[in-house]
Image (cartoon, rainbow, N blue to C red):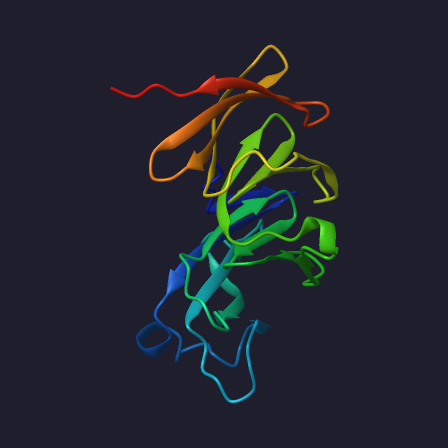
Amino acid sequence: MEANIKEWTIGECVFKVTEVDGETHLKDFWFSVMNINIGKPKGKLPDRYYLVCKKDNSHLNYTPYMLVELCYDHNPYFPTYTLWHNYLLIARFEDFYYIDLLSLEVHKFPTKESEKFLYFGHFYQEADRLLFASESCLYCFDENLTLIWQTEEIACDGVLVHGYEDGYLDVHGENDPPGGWIQYKVEFATGKAIKLGWVVTE
């Protein structure tokens, strides 16, 4: 269920994403592919690189297509990435970016004050929806990464999705860290969270 996808097919093209070392692996094609910068302050070298390769009917093997250069700005908190429909998503600490693999347009989330979060948690995929867990809320997006719903604050230090059944997500929110988790049923269609009680651990 957790979205940890590194290869994705769009039409007749297959895209593959690899985290690479810029010092040793990029010099052969640095200037031959599209470079996209994310969060890059002036004069600062990127902290991480993501190489996107693709293959189609005219290429049996993967060929370099795009290089994403990522900077942390101020907080190197476990950046992660996944593929979703036409998009490459890269999450940093307080935001995530999504790049259209066909048009190469770059977008950023959140865009509104009400959508802001303190830190990124996990991406999950359920049916044709992408779920994004922050430190306090769960967000649900459609295939175009339009926000469908956002739960109320159900945690203070982490949200985890454990499963889906009969129209509800099984969600745990950490409310008394470390280790104090509350279980919720979250309605998949609306994002309404129903508190079930504290999770008992042995």
Kindly give the residue lying farthest to the front in the view shown: 176
Q: Position of residue 46 (x, y in %)?
A: 45, 76
When the figure is inspected, residue 186 is found, relative to residue 69, above or below; the finding is above
6 vs 56, left or right, is left
Kindly give the residue lying farthest to the left in the view shown: 202
When the figure is inspected, residue 158 is found, relative to residue 101, above or below; the finding is above
**Pick the front one: 19 or 169:** 169
* Quarter of the image where one finds residue 75: bottom left
Q: Residue at x 46, y 41 (%)?
A: 158
How many marks the image carries: the answer is 0
70 vs 128, left or right, is left
Q: Residue at x 44, y 57 (%)?
A: 79
Q: Position of residue 81 (x, y in %)?
A: 49, 52
Q: Residue at x 49, y 69 (%)?
A: 70
Q: Position of residue 131 (x, y in %)?
A: 59, 36
* Quarter of the image where one finds residue 186: top right
Kindly give the residue lying farthest to the bottom in the view shown: 43
**Pick the front one: 170 or 153:** 153
When the figure is inspected, residue 48 is found, relative to residue 84, above or below; the finding is below
140 vs 133, left or right, is right
When the figure is inspected, residue 14 is found, relative to residue 25, above or below; the finding is above
Q: Quadrant of the C terminus?
A: top left
Q: Residue at x 67, y 63 (%)?
A: 104
**Pick the front one: 175 or 3:** 175
Q: Position of residue 73 (x, y in %)?
A: 50, 73
* Quarter of the image where one finds residue 200: top left
